[in-house]
Amino acid sequence: MRIYSSLWNADDWATRGGLIKTDWSKAPFSASYRNFKSVTSTSAATSNSWLNEELDNTSQERLKWVQNNCMVYNYCNDSKRFPQGFPADCAM
């Protein structure tokens, strides 16, 4: 299995309003993943049962910790980027 991802284009919204400057001399940029776990069961992957799973209390707390300590940008809080209203997935 392989994972592919892309890096954003360092627009103002992705750089904390320009506080973090992009050092283009370090391009091309790359990303790596540690301890990645994926669905390995063919039946689980085809039935999409994981789409209906919910986080337990411990997992919710872990997610909150990551959001508070690691998340740089949340487009659901960027009213400048979405003056006409936030995307539908922000209401979830």
Image: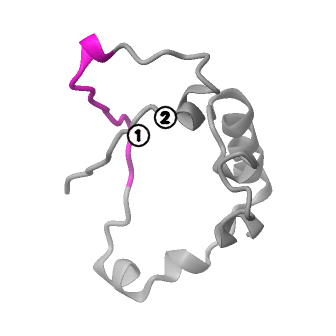
Front in this rendered view, residue 28 or 21: 21
Q: Position of residue 54 (x, y in %)?
A: 68, 69
> Mark 2 or 1, which is nearer the eye?
2
Indicate whether 70 appears above or below 36.
above
Residue at point 68%, 56% (across, down)? 82
Q: Please tell me in which quadrant of the rendered image residue 22 appears.
A: top left
Labelled pair 2, 1 in contact (Cβ < 8 Å): yes
Quadrant of image for the N terminus: bottom left
Disc 1 marks which residue? 8
How packed is label 2: few (under 14 Cα within 10 Å), some, or many (20 or more)?
few
Q: Secondary structure at mark 1?
A: loop
Name the mark on residue 11: 2
What residue lies at 26% left-to-right and 11% top-to-bottom? 25
Mark identifier at residue 17: none
| Left or right of 33 in this view: 92 | right
Question: Over which residues does the magenta segment extend?
Answer: 24-37
Distance CA(mark 2)–CA(mark 1): 8 Å
| Left or right, residue 28 beside residue 81 | left
